[in-house]
Image (spheres, rainbow, N blue to C red):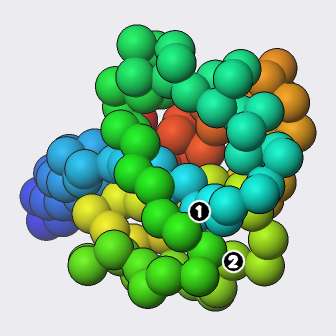
Amino acid sequence: MPGRSAAFALAASLALTSLAQASELSLLMIRQEGCGYCRQWDREVGPVYPKTAEGRAAPLQEADFHDPLPAGVTLARPPAFTPTFVLLADGAEMGRIEGYPGEAFFWGLLGRLIAENGHE
């Protein structure tokens, strides 16, 4: 019965989409003392980040470059420099922004990462 298998495939696809959208996103900022680009992000984005749609979709966590990662965080590869912004879904890396490209580019890159991972 071709109709039943197509319906089953559609239902499975919808269930997977719902699960992907139900994952908890966060943004991990990996920084270190003395990082000028980290301070620039702090001035330009930091104060408004939690008030934005992106900040609500992916709340900010911070970690020091030299310290172990927070519990439950898995990265695809270690960060090479600071700042590195890692989009996490349930603690697993989904994408990253290496460096701070300035406020305008940061928002565009982050918005694209969030959208690519099934969140608006």
Separation of residues labelled 1 and 2 (CA atoms)? 8 Å
Residue 21 on image: x %, y %? 28, 44
**Above or below — where is 48 with respect to 92?**
above
Find residue 99 and report its image quarter. bottom right
Q: In the image, what residue type sits under mark 2?
A: Pro
Asked whether disc 1 touches disc 2, contact meaning CB atoms under 8 Å apart, the reply is yes
Of the numbered discs in the image, which one, if any, rests on residue 12? none
Along the viewing direction, whichever of 119 and 27 lies nearer the viewer: 27
Quadrant in the picture for residue 105: top right
In the image, residue 3 above or below residue 100: below
Amino acid at the residue labelled 1: Ile
Q: How many marks?
A: 2
> What residue is disc 2 on?
79
Q: Residue drawn at (41%, 42%), measured in percent from left and top?
A: 60
- Density class for disc 2 (Cα within 10 Å; few <14, some 14-19, many ≥20) is some
Query: Horizontal placement of 111 versus 60: left or right?
Result: right
The local crowd at label 1, few if under 14, some if 14 to 19, many if 20 or more residues have their Cα within 10 Å, is many
Q: Nearer the viewer, residue 105 or 65?
A: 65
- Image quarter hosting the N terminus: bottom left
Find numbered disc 2 in the image and state the secondary structure of the residue it sits on: loop
Is 113 or 65 nearer to us in this picture?
Answer: 65
Of the image marks 1 and 2, the number of the one nearer the N terminus: 1
Q: Residue 30 — which label?
A: 1
- Left-right relation of 114 to 91: right
- Residue found at x 59% / y 62%: 30
Image location (x, y in percent) of residue 109: 73, 37
State whether residue 38 appears in this view.
yes
Q: Position of residue 66 (x, y in %)?
A: 59, 82
**Direction from residue 40 to residue 76 in the image, left or right:** left
Q: Quadrant of the C terminus?
A: top left
Q: Residue at x 24, y 53 (%)?
A: 23
